Amino acid sequence: MNDVTTPILTLRNVGKRFGTNQVLKGVDLDVQRSEVVCLIGPSGSGKSTLLRSMAFLEEYDEGEIHINGQLLGWQSISPRRRASRSRLNQVRSSLGMVFQQFNLWPHMSALGNVCEALVRVKGLTRSDAERKGRAMLDKVGLAEKADAFPAQLSGGQQQRVAIARALAMEPSLMLFDEPTSALDPELVGEVLQVMKQLAADGMTMVVVTHEMGFAAQVADTVAFLDGGHIVAKGAPRDIFHDTEHPRLQQFLQNYLDRNAFWQDLKETPA
Amino acid sequence: MFDWPTFLESLPLMAQALVVTLQTSLVGLAFGFVIGIAVASMRLSPTPLLRRLGGAYIFVFRGVPLLVQLLFIYYLLPRIGLPNIPPIGAAIIGLALASGAYIAEIFRGGFLAIPHGQLEAANLLGLSPWQTLTRIKVPQAIRLTLPALVNEMILLIKASSLVSVVGLADLTRVAQNLAASNYLFLQTYLVLALFYCLINIPLAGLGSLLERRLGRSA
């Protein structure tokens, strides 16, 4: 099951509908061990829904998702019967997730946030959990903020605590749902830096992001979603440079236009 | 004006009654909290039957006056074959059931104010529904609704004066008895009022203190 050639995450024909709105229309994706996959696409393209389906925060209603060879969320596919809570937790125990809104628990310190599941779920003693929690906070560069409460931390620091909280559970796959979209531009870098380090350490990652620079630099594979499909997928070079796909070209052009404000200034006489 | 010797003579009885009122109210409130959290969770459950049961509970116990509930518990339940309940038991049950309905509505508001993403994070990290309730939802709901909860506690302690109808020697009952024998109605009821203030003013103070202390970390 942990064979290097077996994908850690496989999606086969995954579909999801909200009422009459078909958000995902048959998505196929394999994620190999230590691979970094970035999901890009316009809003409403289904990329967040796809990522949330990988954690079964959305119940995908067509196709199959396997994590480490185990079917996620469902006990059987036809008819669809939900897996028991303990079964779901067991399959999900190998994944960690980081959210756009951090989702730290505001009544617990940074260390408390990291230690909570270590104590309650993994059954570590308080002192073992704290040792491990401090090591995780150190890893994201926040060792000295262990006793701070979320409200006392900047957005970037909160997101790094959230990353430490997920890492503490020793996942083999990390999901990031627009981890820098709620941050002030100046704080984006520190979070991306932690994510780059994680990727360099060999963590398997699926990242929904609007940070094309990060995708270009760190991703092994970039997948472009539009209208509930993966319409283009490949190495960053293929996606960002050599694509012939009109919708992707348009998407990238929009992104470039938005980020090229200085070009206008250059052309305007002072 | 103020008859000090009679006042001093009545003090031991009033002090005893204060203990009865405190015991009844606080034990009633403690159970009321448990009922409140349970009913609030039912009201927000994904299961329609549970939601309806929670709603029915609040409809009944918030809708029927506490006085009527107490009479019902003390006089009517034994008639339909249930064992006799001592006055203090009936008083505690009555206060717990009624405060549970109010606390449930307060907690429902508190639970709804917690961002859903926090619960998703808890769920993904493997916390059980019980752990999520006790470690994530309740501590935050208490912080978010502390002013309303303190208000409810004070209201309940004042409402506990109604338990005198089941014959419990609480503050109100004892003061009534004293006034009936010393004929100093105004003085005795003034003292009674002061005794209630004696409980509620520190309680309100404790509430503000907690708000300030918890506010720092929330």
Image (cartoon, rainbow, N blue to C red):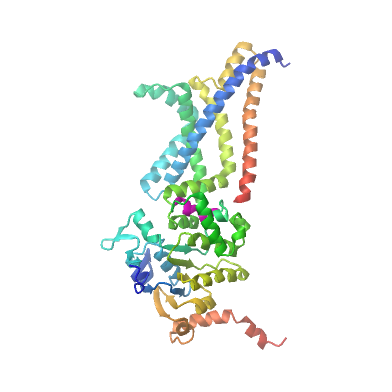
**Residue found 59% across the figure and 71% down from its top:** A189
Is residue B126 found left or right of B173 in the rendered image? left
Q: Can residue A73 be seen here?
A: yes
**Residue found 35% across the figure and 60% down from its top:** A73
Which quadrant is home to the C terminus of chain A?
Answer: bottom right
Residue situated furthest left in the rendering:
A78
Is residue B49 found left or right of B177 in the rendered image? left
Is residue B213 found left or right of A101 in the rendered image? right
Secondary structure, magenta segment, majority class: helix
Is residue A199 found left or right of A84 in the rendered image? right
User: Which of the pair A18/B33 is nearer the observer?
Assistant: B33
Measured from the top left, where is residue B153 in percent x and y? 56, 35
Q: Can residue A105 be seen here?
A: no
Measured from the top left, where is residue B128 in percent x and y? 42, 50
Measured from the top left, where is residue B175 in percent x and y? 60, 19
Q: In this rendering, is residue B162 above or below A208?
A: above
User: Which of the pair B105/A263 is nearer the observer?
Assistant: A263
Measured from the top left, where is residue A87 in percent x and y? 34, 56
User: Which of the pair B54/A155 is nearer the observer?
Assistant: A155
Q: In this rendering, is residue A119 above or below B84?
A: below
**Residue found 42% across the figure and 66% down from its top:** A172
User: Which of the pair B180/A93 is nearer the observer?
Assistant: A93
Which quadrant is home to the N terminus of chain A?
Answer: bottom left
Q: How many marks?
A: 0
Q: Classify residue B5 by image quadrant.
A: top right
Examine the structure image and report whether residue A113 is included in the region drawn in magenta. yes
Q: Classify residue B6 by image quadrant.
A: top right
Magenta range is A112-120
Examine the structure image and report whether residue B156 is included in the region drawn in magenta. no
Q: In this rendering, is residue B144 above or below B206?
A: below
